Image: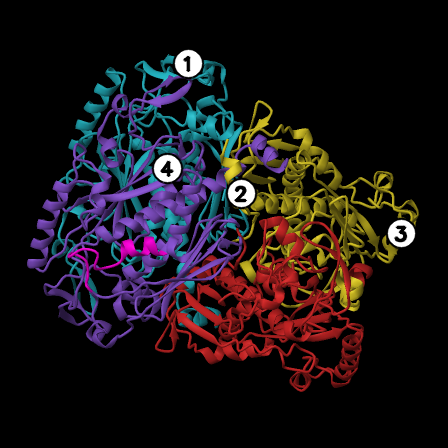
Chain colours: A yellow, B red, C purple, D cyan
Amino acid sequence: MPGSTFGSVFQITTWGESHGKALGVVIDGCPAGLPLCEEDIQTYLDRRKPGQSKFTTKRREGDCVQILSGVFEGKTTGTPISLMVENTDQRSGDYGELAELYRPGHADYAYDQKYGFRDYRGGGRSSGRETLARVAAGAVAAKILSQLGITVTAYTKAIGNVEISADRFDLEECGNNGLYMPDRQAAQQAALLISECVKSQDSVGGVIECRVDNLTAGVGEPCFDKLDANLAKALMSIGAVKAVEIGDGAASAKTRGSQNNDSMYSINQKLEKESNHGGGIYGGISDGSQILVRAYVKPTPSIAAPQKTVDRNMENREIVIRGRHDPVIVPRAVVVVECMTALTVLDSLFASMTSRMDQVIRFFDR
Amino acid sequence: MPGSTFGSVFQITTWGESHGKALGVVIDGCPAGLPLCEEDIQTYLDRRKPGQSKFTTKRREGDCVQILSGVFEGKTTGTPISLMVENTDQRSGDYGELAELYRPGHADYAYDQKYGFRDYRGGGRSSGRETLARVAAGAVAAKILSQLGITVTAYTKAIGNVEISADRFDLEECGNNGLYMPDRQAAQQAALLISECVKSQDSVGGVIECRVDNLTAGVGEPCFDKLDANLAKALMSIGAVKAVEIGDGAASAKTRGSQNNDSMYSINQKLEKESNHGGGIYGGISDGSQILVRAYVKPTPSIAAPQKTVDRNMENREIVIRGRHDPVIVPRAVVVVECMTALTVLDSLFASMTSRMDQVIRFFDR
Amino acid sequence: MPGSTFGSVFQITTWGESHGKALGVVIDGCPAGLPLCEEDIQTYLDRRKPGQSKFTTKRREGDCVQILSGVFEGKTTGTPISLMVENTDQRSGDYGELAELYRPGHADYAYDQKYGFRDYRGGGRSSGRETLARVAAGAVAAKILSQLGITVTAYTKAIGNVEISADRFDLEECGNNGLYMPDRQAAQQAALLISECVKSQDSVGGVIECRVDNLTAGVGEPCFDKLDANLAKALMSIGAVKAVEIGDGAASAKTRGSQNNDSMYSINQKLEKESNHGGGIYGGISDGSQILVRAYVKPTPSIAAPQKTVDRNMENREIVIRGRHDPVIVPRAVVVVECMTALTVLDSLFASMTSRMDQVIRFFDR
Amino acid sequence: MPGSTFGSVFQITTWGESHGKALGVVIDGCPAGLPLCEEDIQTYLDRRKPGQSKFTTKRREGDCVQILSGVFEGKTTGTPISLMVENTDQRSGDYGELAELYRPGHADYAYDQKYGFRDYRGGGRSSGRETLARVAAGAVAAKILSQLGITVTAYTKAIGNVEISADRFDLEECGNNGLYMPDRQAAQQAALLISECVKSQDSVGGVIECRVDNLTAGVGEPCFDKLDANLAKALMSIGAVKAVEIGDGAASAKTRGSQNNDSMYSINQKLEKESNHGGGIYGGISDGSQILVRAYVKPTPSIAAPQKTVDRNMENREIVIRGRHDPVIVPRAVVVVECMTALTVLDSLFASMTSRMDQVIRFFDR
């Protein structure tokens, strides 16, 4: 209930703050016998590292993951997997003034109200660094899913008002630009936009889209634990996300039923749909088609321009946030969205194993 | 984990399907000593009843709630409150063909894939009638919140492309039109739009907005159980909802940090903000200002026009859905959004009681 | 967390108090396709009914179960199964004095302290009638287990100091005496003991033993959710139970390792053990042999003899509890122990389905 | 559900195995503002260290705890507290034969059946070293309880058939003998018994008792989450525990109601009881008197004498367990029982904060 645990079958518990000794995650419920090494996880962590493009912060973060438990002779043992990343740079000298001031758009004031005081170093637990633990766990979830033939793929759909085009969509392109945009032209435009933001001491938001392919039908529970409800929670729990959509999302509110319904037909006894406005989820349950979710990310609240705020004594003050901050958080958050989606899908998939008596009987009849 | 339970401190478990004997909910975790009678709950249930306006279905549903346990001498006892609404009309004769056909935009196919078969009468568990149990529980949550001075208010923000105007906003107006729109002029336009839909055997979606006023700062947990994450799950778990937003939501993805940050200042030692783009939640925690959430509802999938689909044998078929169905589900879903918001806020509020050691010590020092 | 929910995969939520309108349970997580009718459940409920023998209360309780949801065309649908038993006799006139007095050995005082007031009619939620909902749910769990070849069998091991003998052990005998004792001679002695108690306006306790046969090895989790830990909670949560044992239980504390270890050997490549002191559970995990648990039940606290107590105003008083009460609760609690064991074993069994990656892959490779 | 998490409000998640890199625990739900340093925790860890007396293993285990997160400027921040103990001695060379053989009385066979293989080094996750993480977390729980005036005290009640005497009971004495026995004479006898066991290459079990003093009335939930049920789970989840009792426990099954009921009277408007057979819990709820629980510990299964067993290929074999092992595990388990009790009581105490509407209103009316 205190909320650092996510999932019910494949369950993760994260810990750590921006400038503490380390951050980490405990994965409980990983099946035994999965080959797993640090490299499997490091690959994912590297995708959220700063310094990947010229638009992400230059601070050096080593972010080297260690597996502390749950793996023996190269395979998971079925018991908790503890993953840890040590904070190599814990200097906190230059956070002096921030101990007193509430940064606009940040959680500083809310934390102080909730807890009576806060770890003001780099935002403490509310820092984006917290997502590092999610990514480490998500890498393991993604590996399990891939062994079941399921793939999860996220990318930048938009930065500010620069959006990718369906015509130019090319996943390969994601790796070429530092923005994880599957559209070379859009990426170039976005780069210009970001440069502009930097010049004007400002920041910008964007949209991340995520697809799940090859997920079996029947995943998700009918009532509160609908697959889309769990995905909504998973993505909205990422720091700067302010909206979540499934399939056509908000747009479907303006359409008619005749347009929005996904007509079905069959070819060779296999179900096909003429459209996928529903994003692969109906009544909270997957139908075997592609799952499509979208997360809307607000602009980085840390901007260089001076802002009005108050301090802990409720005095009116001006704040100037120094240090390097990402003018856009979207590119680094892509892997976070991908990982939260993977964690959610895997957990729901595992939960679906007891849906049918005939399948349960067959499972134990071994 | 099977997902008919919501909340961790104030916990509800719902049951029942469209054409079963009854539907209901068990509320576990309601503090003792709350005055509670059936009328408190019935008032909320009546708001989601069909036949409230000319645009909602004419089927008669009595929907009379009974309190079966947990209340003694007019007050809650602290033990589970069981609420039940009997289904007075359980005829299922006219669902014959629907037992075989998969309705587009509905959960029929997904259910069959998950469970091997399904209760096809009126959608079974996937029916909108399931929300009746949520509303019954939400009425109790709202009563507790009101005793703490907190109010939750939902209304129709848009139907199709007809949106309310901030200038004409008038909550009183909600009660005057059958659409729960706080804008008389918009309600009239929406009524025309809906009439048009009915004529063309079609349906339309819309947007529901919900405000929480007077919620104390410090509610919500920092990581996965952020207040906005829990709200996102709560709202996305409602049948036809396809997108959820907090504060400016998706729009914030297109803005700059300098615009989107909510500047703070103080008057008489009290915090004020120049804007509330964040919707009252920062880092997942309330800041004491108004909470603002939005749910986007897809058009009713049950439309009278013929549609292409398949049957259980994967034969291509045409489906014509008979009977009366709401051309727009939004007006009846308003109270559902309000109740799910109330349930979420109350649960998070209760969970916040152990945030601070000084408050814990004071609580037990009695 | 408020604690009327048990289990995580096969999850039950109970509600209802002694003299309310009804009692019931919601089962969430029952696989679809299980044949289920009211008779399946009624059989179990009848075993805990009063009036089964001359030593159980004569009050008439119909205890007819109704299935309100989750079953369609004779099979479970996979959605919540709501079971209800209406209280036919809700007269509360003769509980007048008990509203003020705290019965020794009962929860009256503790409830008043916790909730500020209480439903004093028949003990309210703390009444033994609460177990009715557990039995209804347990009947469903037992039916699933039986389809997997697993049987759960409870019986009276002792009443007061009259214990069954291993030499005379005969399960068939349980049905012949009203005490569910698998030993005719012990049952006769126990009957005498109980008669004596009745004469002296007193009551007596006893021991219930429960066996689980044919449970596969590998059930139970290594740390907090050990199979024996979950069984201990399940049994200790039954009203009058004051001790729980696994295998040799308390006796093993007095033995030596060389005696208490269960030596293993193999015959035809199959594991056998020379003893089962461990009760079939090692490190919290089943080893494929018989599971053996024991619950120690205190004497019925409601006795006819006058007792010293206090009232709500902390005045010293004498209490005389009128009405018919079971001089021993053990025979009626046998089916409760059996059902709580079945619920626990089933939940742990389902949870074990994701223990191994190879089995998970095989499950989804269909 | 995978079961390495305990508690619902004050929630802990443990990880680590005997010979891995480290062991640890994440505490989620600790209120902010609690003064906490490593020394607070180390004191508890030192109590379970080997080498405390001549009867515990001589292996050197540093067991130095590190606080990795959740504490800032000497106080808890309200966010997850991550505690870690590195394994300084990870040599695994001498476990060769044990990789193949199943040790009687251990979880080796059950693990292999569950997971398909196991970390055989020192028992892996099933090792007693796992309790180290419980103790670290329990130290924090105990510190919170002590700030609320509540104390938890465990001690050795018996080793083999040597039991402490009520007449000679002296808590101070626990610190003087290495056996944590509050009775000097019994401790001397027990020491002789253990020496004898060592000589005969055998081991012995015992009993641990734990008291909770000054716990307020009203703690514990009425149905499944009874305080005694949660305690039973907590203690039975400790490796070698085979029975758990509350108050008079098993003995009450042989008594009469007139003996077992705890008569109440009042002095100066305060409730007193003539006895405490119930162990301070009625209907699952504390009554404000002393809580009394007991855990029965089996003899250490690792004995030096040769034993019959099988190997992974189901060949009959003889096993000789080398290395130093505790001839009795009870003294080192005392602090584990104390910590699991503290964790349970604290979690139930926190959960009780929403029992009454009047108290909730007062809490938020600040």
**A318 lies above or below C286:** below
Amino acid bearing label 2: Asp
Q: Are marks 2 and 1 on the same chain?
A: no
Q: Residues within 10 Å of mark 1 (few under 14, many from 20)?
A: some
Marks 3 and 4 sit apart, C-alpha to C-alpha, by: 58 Å
Above or below residue C362? Residue B77 is below
Tell me, for residue A358, which label it has, or none. Answer: 2
Q: Which residues are magenta?
A: C42-58
Instruction: Measure the alpha-carbon separation of dots 2 and 3.
Output: 46 Å
Front disc: 4 or 1: 1
| Circle 2 or circle 1, nearest the eye | 2
- In the structure shown, which secondary structural element does the residue marked by tag 4 occupy? loop
Circle 1 residue: D315
User: Quick check: marks 1 and 3 in contact, CB under 8 Å?
Assistant: no
Q: Is residue D224 visible?
A: no
- In what element is the residue under mark 3? loop
The secondary structure type at the circle numbered 1 is loop
State which quadrant residue D205 falls in.
Answer: top left
Q: Which residue is mark 3?
A: A165
Whether marks 2 and 4 lie on the same chain: no
Instruction: Between label 2 and label 3, give the one nearer the viewer.
Output: 2
Return the mark for residue D238.
4
| Badge 2 or badge 3: first in the primary sequence | 3
Nearer the observer, disc 1 or disc 3?
1
* Subunit that carries the residue with mark 4: D
Residue C25's x, y, as percent? Answer: 41, 59
Please tell me how crowded label 3 is: few (under 14), some (14-19), or many (20+) other residues with Cα within 10 Å. Answer: some
